[in-house]
């Protein structure tokens, strides 16, 4: 359920910020959350083509071979990060990287970027990790016209390296970040022009998503008359 929740939250923000006519996806990583996210994004955009990049050629080929027939999409394993970014309407990074996975200068007008990597600041501060996790470089943030995020407070609390650190360096300002809840409530705008580059940081789990998914799981179990009733 946690994996589904993360992918669903990514899909909501991507739906709000990506172009409505987006049909192609550049995907970084070929396991775990990459699969969940592909399935989730298919629910908010009519995807046709997917380019998947992983540092391991076998992994990206395996992903294409498995997910292509499952989704009925044209999934192409590509040999470089640049190939994954160039021409993709949506770029999604689903890694645990501690360095940016692509160069933001490759982005073209109209593209959207979603990133999900979590914070490991506690591990860094206690000497268990050498660097804080980040998938996105400063160029991506600087070139983006709209900066969506789930929770600004979480980015501050966790000192998330792809948001907190660039703000500290003056790449962007805190007031440039727009929480997707505010967009959903109609208090702020997301994308306003088709040629804007938009960015979305899925940086915090939402309890309401766990409740919704838990209710769906329970409903499925009850309809199938499966599971086990526990008596307290």
Image (cartoon, helix red, strand yellow):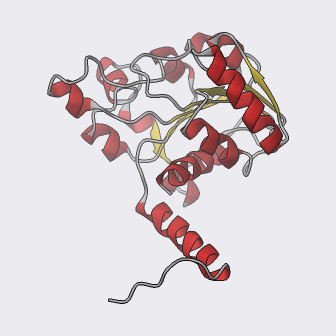
Residue depicted at x 32% and y 29%: 164
Q: In this view, does 210 lie above or below 195?
A: below
Q: Which residue lies furthest to the left in this view?
A: 126
Q: Is residue 137 above or below residue 62?
A: above
Q: Quadrant of the C terminus?
A: bottom left
Q: In this view, does 121 lie above or below 148?
A: above
> As drawn, is 226 to the left or to the right of 174?
right
Residue 134, x across and y down, in percent: 41, 24
Residue depicted at x 47% and y 69%: 211
Q: Nearer the viewer, residue 179 or 51?
A: 51
Residue 23, x across and y down, in percent: 81, 36
How many numbered markers are drawn? Answer: 0
> As drawn, is 184 to the left or to the right of 24?
left
Q: In this view, does 45 lie above or below 127?
A: below
Q: Which of 216 and 62 is in front in this view?
A: 62
Residue 87, x across and y down, in percent: 77, 19
Residue depicted at x 74% and y 35%: 66
The answer, for residue 141, to whether it is visible in the render is yes
Figure quadrant of residue 21: top right
Residue 40, x across and y down, in percent: 66, 48
Q: Residue furthest bottom?
A: 231
Q: Nearer the viewer, residue 219 or 84?
A: 219
> As drawn, is 167 to the left or to the right of 177?
left
The answer, for residue 107, to whether it is visible in the render is no
Q: Nearer the viewer, residue 54 or 221?
A: 221
């Amino acid at each position: 359920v946690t994996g589904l929740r993360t992918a669903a939250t990514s899909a909501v923000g991507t739906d709000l910020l990506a172009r409505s006519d987006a049909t192609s996806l550049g995907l970084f990583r070929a396991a775990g959350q990459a699969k969940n996210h592909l399935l989730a994004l298919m629910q908010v955009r009519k995807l046709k083509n997917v380019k998947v990049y992983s540092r391991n050629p076998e992994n990206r080929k395996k992903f294409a071979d498995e997910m292509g027939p499952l989704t009925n999409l044209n999934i192409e394993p590509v040999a470089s990060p640049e190939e994954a970014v160039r021409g993709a309407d949506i770029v999604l990074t689903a890694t645990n990287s501690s360095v940016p996975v692509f160069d933001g200068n490759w982005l073209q007008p109209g593209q959207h970027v979603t990133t999900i990597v979590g914070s490991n600041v506690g591990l860094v501060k206690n000497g268990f990790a050498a660097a804080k996790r980040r998938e996105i470089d400063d160029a991506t943030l600087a070139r983006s016209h709209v900066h969506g995020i789930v929770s600004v407070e979480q980015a501050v609390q966790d000192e998330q390296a792809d948001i907190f650190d660039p703000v500290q360096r003056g790449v962007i300002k805190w007031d440039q970040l727009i929480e997707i809840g505010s967009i959903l409530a109609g208090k702020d705008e997301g994308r306003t022009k088709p040629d804007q580059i938009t960015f979305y940081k899925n940086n915090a789990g939402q309890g309401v998503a766990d409740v919704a998914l838990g209710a769906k799981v329970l409903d499925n179990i009850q309809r199938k008359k499966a599971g086990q009733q526990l008596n307290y």
